Image (cartoon, rainbow, N blue to C red):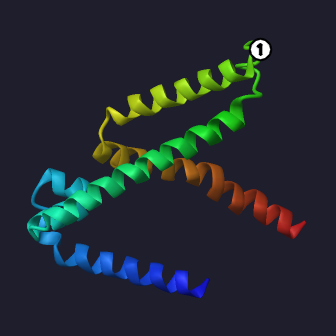
Amino acid sequence: MWVSFVMNTVALGMAVIMLMSYQGIYSKSEAGLTLPTLTSLASMHMDWMMIVYGITLVLCLISTGVTTTFVFVSRFENSKVVAKIQNPVRRRITISAFIIILSMTIALAGLTNIIKFGYGYCGYLAIAIVVIPFLTIGVYKNRK
């Protein structure tokens, strides 16, 4: 367990050092701000590493998409909205198709806009859903 922790810590530290040292290069272009690691590799003329990074990135996106779709299907397959569909396979396909279409529609906004606006709004939403109840209801329950 500790070996994995140390390896991840070292890898993260090396990535941070690389990105900080090449900040002047990737911050000059719009594409560099979206994928700074890819821009840094391009500026180092490491074409083979760009291919490895691209393949790894695609595999990460695929595994995340499969996992997210599976979780949404298992969460919503027994909801009232899709209860009219009697066949469980069709119900799962319908939920999967909806999640994929919704994800692709959101992806049309672009990675930069999703990060810039989506994360910001998620932060505001977290303040309303997590922080304020924690500070009000949580304090009340602890005193009680």
Crowd tier of the residue under label 1, counting other residues whose Cα lies within 10 Å: few below 14, some 14–19, many 20 or above: few
**In the picture provided, is 80 more to the left or to the right than 143?**
left
Q: What's the residue at 54%, 24% (across, down)?
A: 98
Question: Which residue type carries mark 1?
Answer: Gln
Q: Secondary structure at mark 1?
A: loop
Query: In which quadrant will I find the N terminus?
Result: bottom right
User: 141 or 34, which lies in front?
Assistant: 34
Which quadrant, please, contains the C terminus? bottom right
Q: Is residue 61 left or right of residue 30?
A: right
Q: Examine the rendering and report whether any part of residue 36 can be seen.
A: no
Residue shown at 36% from the left, 36% from the top: 107
- Where is residue 83, by image quadrant? top right
Residue at screen point 15% across, 51% down? 30
In terms of depth relative to the viewer, which is nearer, 27 or 59?
Answer: 59
19 sits to left or right of 26: right
Q: Nearer the viewer, residue 115 or 128?
A: 115
Horizontal and vertical percent position of residue 67:
57, 46
Image x and y of residue 111, in percent: 31, 45
Q: Where residue 103 sits in the image (x, y, percent)?
A: 45, 33
Name which residue lies at 77% across and 28% down.
78
Disc 1 designates what residue? 86
